[in-house]
Image (cartoon, helix red, strand yellow):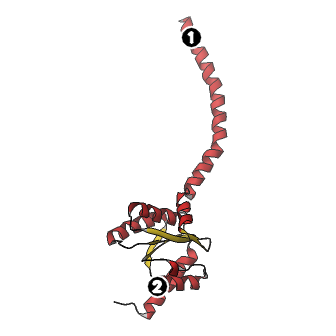
Amino acid sequence: MAKTRVQKQEAVAELADKIRRMKAAAFASISGFTMKDADNLRIKGREAGVDILVTKKTLLKLAAKEAGLEAIDPSTFEGSLLSAFAYNDEVSAAKLLSGLAKEREFVKILGGVLEGNMVAADEVAKLAALPSKTQLLAQLVGSLNAPVSGFVNVLSGNLRGLVTVLKAVQEKKV
């Protein structure tokens, strides 16, 4: 059953809201996509803070225009369009769709949106290769902690040496 004009306007308004709130988006062609695949992807998306939608290209273009992102032009994409909108960080949508593309040969990354600009499929793949925000923060904390840990190990090395010498003296006297 075809959607009415009011339903399409509501869909455009909802998409425009998602586009305004997103940090990044990724788009993929999904011919041969099953409901089971969609459900699994939505579950993974919820965990990563990513909304997954199958969208009509014309509605996406209208929503992008309404949201003030004229750069989004889905008319250049081929096939059915799967949209992933990331709200937490810039790489999660790209990671999610790249992971799906590796699992399923029928999924093809078409492009994405980063900082309000369209990016090509190869740039989406590069984004997917980047570590997530939490991983980067963990690496930063590890880097900041390394000098302190080294200093503690140097100081405890002297104490360990003293304990070893005292134990050797004690064993020699016994």
Residue 38 sits in which quadrant?
bottom left
Q: Tell which of 59 and 14 is nearer to you.
A: 59
Residue 111: percent from the left, percent from the top? Answer: 53, 71
Residue 29, quarter of picture: bottom left
Q: Quadrant of the N terminus?
A: bottom left
Q: Residue furthest top?
A: 173
Q: Is residue 44 visible?
A: yes
Q: From this view, report whether residue 29 is shown above or below residue 75.
A: above
Where 12 sits versus 43, above or below? below
Tag 2's secondary structure? Answer: helix
Residue 26 seen in this snapshot: no
Residue pointed to by mark 1: 170
Q: Amino acid at mark 2?
A: Ala
**Residue in view at x 38 percent, y 68 percent:** 106
Label 2 and label 1: CA atoms lie apart by 82 Å
Residue under pointer 2: 11
Mark closer to the observer (2, 1): 2
Q: Amino acid at mark 1?
A: Gln
Q: Where residue 10 sits: x, y (%)?
A: 47, 87
Q: Position of residue 56 (x, y in %)?
A: 45, 82
Q: Nearer the viewer, residue 107 or 135?
A: 107
Residue density around tag 1, few if under 14, some if 14–19, many if 20 or more, within 10 Å: few
Query: Which one is earlier in the sequence, the residue at label 2 or at label 1?
Result: 2
The answer to whether marks 2 and 1 mark residues whose Cβ atoms lie closer than 8 Å is no
